[in-house]
Image: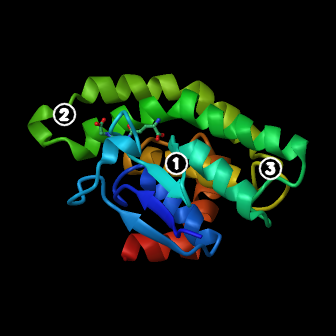
């Protein structure tokens, strides 16, 4: 049985997969796409990270990888039935389609780009566009601690990985206290704190 290979640096979306692999206690190798001698396009034809090779099964798309790994290894992080699976996919797709793009634009224009290349107005517009989805999540978290099944699951991991960019982009969450509390619970997980120190 070949050991799980996770391709991508911890500064990329591969972090989501590495975080989950750590939560699941998996034995894996982390590899970089520009590794000498590696034909990375055979692992991911778009040349993007992350991808995994799980004993010959090659998968790309960070969230698809996480749903696969969670379901394969089971336990508390994974869906217990079809209803939980649907709810976990719902929140994962929601984070990817309703939040990720705006969060990334904010992050680049407030933190990652050199200061003279930042577009503050663009970041502010993206923050304005996020108000509605932030309201949706805040309402959902008003009566529960976690997104699905009253425990930390891959749904929380996937969504909070996207929200780590919201945090790094200094989006104002004063009007969304339940999100701020939930982010604290998710992003304070010992596995993630250790990885970020690492
Ligand atoms: N939807 C994809 C996005 C993958 C993606 O854009 N990855 C970035 C790094 S986080 C990348 O490889 N960028 C390099 C490029 O676009 O060539 C996923 O979630 O896996």
Is the C-beta of the residue carrying label 3 under 8 Å from the nearest atom of ligand 1? no
Report the disc number at residue 58: 1
**Distance between the Cα atoms at labels 3 and 2?**
37 Å
Callout in the foreground (3, 2): 3
Residue 7 image-quadrant placement: bottom left
Name the residue beneath numbered marker 2: 118
- Rendered-image quadrant of the C terminus: bottom left
- Viewed as shown, does residue 28 lie left or right of 189? left
> What secondary structure is found at the residue carrying circle 2?
loop
Mark found first going from the N terminus, 3 or 2? 2
**Distance between the Cα atoms at labels 1 and 3?**
28 Å
Looking at the image, residue 130 lies above or below residue 191: above
- Viewed as shown, does residue 48 lie left or right of 72? left
Name the residue beneath numbered marker 3: 148
Indicate the position of residue 67 as horizontal and vertical percent values.
67, 48
Callout in the foreground (2, 1): 1
Say few, some or many: other residues with alpha carbon within 10 Å of mark 2 (under 14 / 14 to 19 / 20 or more): some
Mark found first going from the N terminus, 2 or 1? 1
- Rendered-image quadrant of the N terminus: bottom right
């Amino acid at each position: 049985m070949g050991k799980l290979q996770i391709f991508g640096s911890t500064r990329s979306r591969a972090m989501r997969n590495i975080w989950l692999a750590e939560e699941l206690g998996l034995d894996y190798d982390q590899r970089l796409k520009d590794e000498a001698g590696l034909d990375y396009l055979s692992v991911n034809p778009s040349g993007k990270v992350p991808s995994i090779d799980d004993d010959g099964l090659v998968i790309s798309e960070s969230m698809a990888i996480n749903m696969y790994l969670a379901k394969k290894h089971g336990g508390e992080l994974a869906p217990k039935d079809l209803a939980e699976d649907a709810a976990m996919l719902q929140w994962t797709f929601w984070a990817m389609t309703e939040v990720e793009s705006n969060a990334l634009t904010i992050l680049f224009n407030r933190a990652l780009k050199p200061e003279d290349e930042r577009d503050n107005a663009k970041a502010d517009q993206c923050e304005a566009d996020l108000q509605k989805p932030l309201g949706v999540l805040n309402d959902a978290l008003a009566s529960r601690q976690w997104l699905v099944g009253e425990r930390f699951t891959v749904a929380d991991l996937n969504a909070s990985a996207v929200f780590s960019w919201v945090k790094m982009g200094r989006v104002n969450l004063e009007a969304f206290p339940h999100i701020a509390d939930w982010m604290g619970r998710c992003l304070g997980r010992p596995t993630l704190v250790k990885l970020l120190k690492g």
